[in-house]
Amino acid sequence: MTQSLGFIDYLRSFLGFVLFVILFFIAIPIIFVILILTFGKATDFIIRNFAPWIAKPVLAVIGIKFSVIQHGKPFTEPAVVLINHSSTLDILTMMAVGMDKIRFVAKWELQYFPFFFIVGRLTGQVFIKRQKSDEAIKKLVSTYDRLKRNQLSVMVAPEGSRKHEGVIGPFKKGAFRMALDLGYPILPIYFEGNNTLSLGGSILAKTGEVKAHIYPPIDTSEWSLETIDEHIRQVRSKYLEWAGVRE
């Protein structure tokens, strides 16, 4: 995590935040009209196109060059998409990826920001209370029918929070149990650069480059509840390897 920002970094971060808010408030009425005209059937189009439309200009203003690196053949089937979570910058990068037929699992507190609340509710995102694990699990389980029926993927940060020791924090079971219950493979995405450019929970960030590495899917068809802890350890070890960390 970086600690040294210059005046230009502060200025660009502030302008990026202002642009983020402006673009969101421009998008809200457009999204609302599109959903009404299409009877709610354009949700996937909105998420796939509007999320990058908002995030990429903001990243550019902040001074961050964003790119997606596909490792292997692109995977288009429904999956539980895992991302590493280390900073507020992750919100922009997960939006910038622009994946098809995806829903995001986000912390409940994001709804305190009006634009996240409105857009999140309009587009069917999943908000959970991380501190109450039983409620969070019930909320995730309640989405299963909708995800399966509409062949939707779901993006989750298995660390649960950006506040953790080390570059890659401990992985919680929720995302892996979800993959097991849904019969979905796991699609790992590793964000390279987020933790070194952003001041953690702050909107402030340095200029630089962020790469979204999309790796081949991990088959979960042979997984079981009895072996899930070992599978979590194996998946986390991949993230540690990508981050260049030894434990």
Image (tube, rainbow, N blue to C red):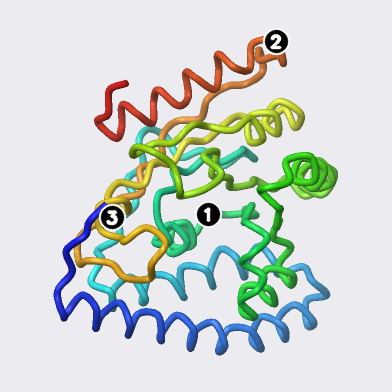
What amino acid does circle 2 point to?
Answer: Glu
The disc, 2 or 1, on the residue closer to the chain's N-terminal end is: 1
Q: Is residue 125 left or right of residue 26?
A: right
Q: Is residue 168 left or right of residue 102?
A: left
**Viewer-nearest of discs 1 and 3:** 3
* Residue receiving disc 1: 99
Q: Position of residue 1 (x, y in %)?
A: 27, 52
Residue type (three-letter) at the residue carrying disc 1? Met
First reached walking from the N terminus: tag 3 or tag 2? 3
Q: Amino acid at mark 3?
A: Val
Residue at x-position 61% and y-position 29%: 185
Q: Is residue 82 above or below residue 34?
A: above
Of 88 and 179, the residue lying toward us: 88
Mark 2, residue position: 226
Q: Nearer the viewer, residue 170 or 237?
A: 170
Q: Residues within 10 Å of mark 1 (few under 14, many from 20)?
A: some
The spot of residue 146 in percent (x, y) is 82, 49
Locate residue 100: give its quadrant: bottom right
Q: Determine which of the numbered discs, if any, sits on residue 200 in the image.
A: none
| Secondary structure under the numbered disc 3 in the rendered image | strand
Identify the residue position indicated by label 3 in the image: 210
How far from the left and from the top, in percent, is residue 14?
33, 82
Q: Is residue 107 left or right of residue 136?
A: left
Mark 1 touches mark 3? (CB < 8 Å): no
Label 3: few (<14), some or many (≥20) within 10 Å?
many
User: Mark 3 to mark 2: distance in Å?
Assistant: 37 Å
Q: Which secondary structure, mark 2? A: loop
Q: Upstream in the sequence, badge 1 or badge 3?
A: 1
Up the image or down, 143 lies above or below 46; here it is above
The quadrant of the rendering that contains the C terminus is top left
Residue drawn at point x = 54 percent, y = 73 percent: 50
